[in-house]
Amino acid sequence: MTGRPPVIGLTGGIGSGKSAAADRFADRGAAVVDSDLIAHQLTAAGGAAIEPIRQAFGNEVITAEGALDRGIMRALAFEQPEARKRLEAILHPMIRAESERQCQTANAPYVMLVVPLLIESGVFRERCQRIVVVDCPESVQVERVKARSGLSDAQVRAIMDAQISRHDRLAAADDIIDNSGDLDALFAQVDRLHECYLRLQSA
Ligand code: ADP
């Protein structure tokens, strides 16, 4: 294979089924590049973002093991929006660079680039040849996230309110996966799209 494989952006609201869909694409042979996973690795012990974060915020936000203390950082970002901006200014360029590196070096017919805030982010959007949105009714999202995380109804709704609306997300989609049914229904749609994506040419 020469050059970089086509990149398809996969997004959806919290609990819509992005991970479930991405896992199925991976089973079929796609290379999955996951921006959340990259963020976790950058902020785990020994991660490349730890020293810049320590310099910006001090040792208080780093655990004894040397990882980002997510609880303390979350509280700080909640109290001081400016702290959140500083953290993002450190992390976002690193996430973009690492995801780009993984897209470039992927050894697969195409790449699924999983980004929860893909529609909101100009840079990620530019990189994608197509955008596939995983969609389900908001009430289903709430139930699935509550079952997964133990968060309350209000907490899940607050996270959803901070994301782009379902309407606007769907309007930006080239392809839509309807995940209002069971997992078999999800997998059947992923398998159909996989056949289409195999035929995509590199941009
Ligand atoms: P996201 O990555 O978009 O936040 P997940 O893929 O983690 O969403 O799905 C949220 C939760 O719902 C997970 O616990 C997942 O196993 C479950 N789930 C996803 N799709 C379905 C489905 N079609 N039927 C039942 N449970 C599902």
Image: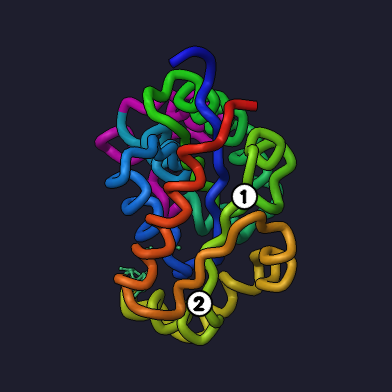
Question: Where residue 81 appears, x then y in whole percent?
Answer: 69, 54
Q: Residue at 41% x, 24% y: name it.
A: 106
- Whether the residue carrying mark 2 lies under 8 Å from ligand 1 is answered with no
| Residue at mark 2 | 156
Q: Residues within 10 Å of mark 1 (few under 14, many from 20)?
A: many
Question: Where residue 182 appears, x then y in whole percent?
Answer: 33, 78
For marks 1 and 2, the one nearer the N-term is 1
**Image: 25 above or below 137:** above
Left or right of 4, for residue 149: left
Question: Where residue 100 appears, x then y in whole percent?
Answer: 54, 25
**Image: 157 above or below 118:** below
| Residue at mark 1 | 131
**Image: 44 above or below 115:** above
Helix, strand or loop at disc 2? helix
Q: Residue at 38% x, 78% y: name it.
A: 144
- Quadrant housing the C terminus: top right
Question: Where residue 168 appears, x then y in whole percent?
Answer: 74, 66
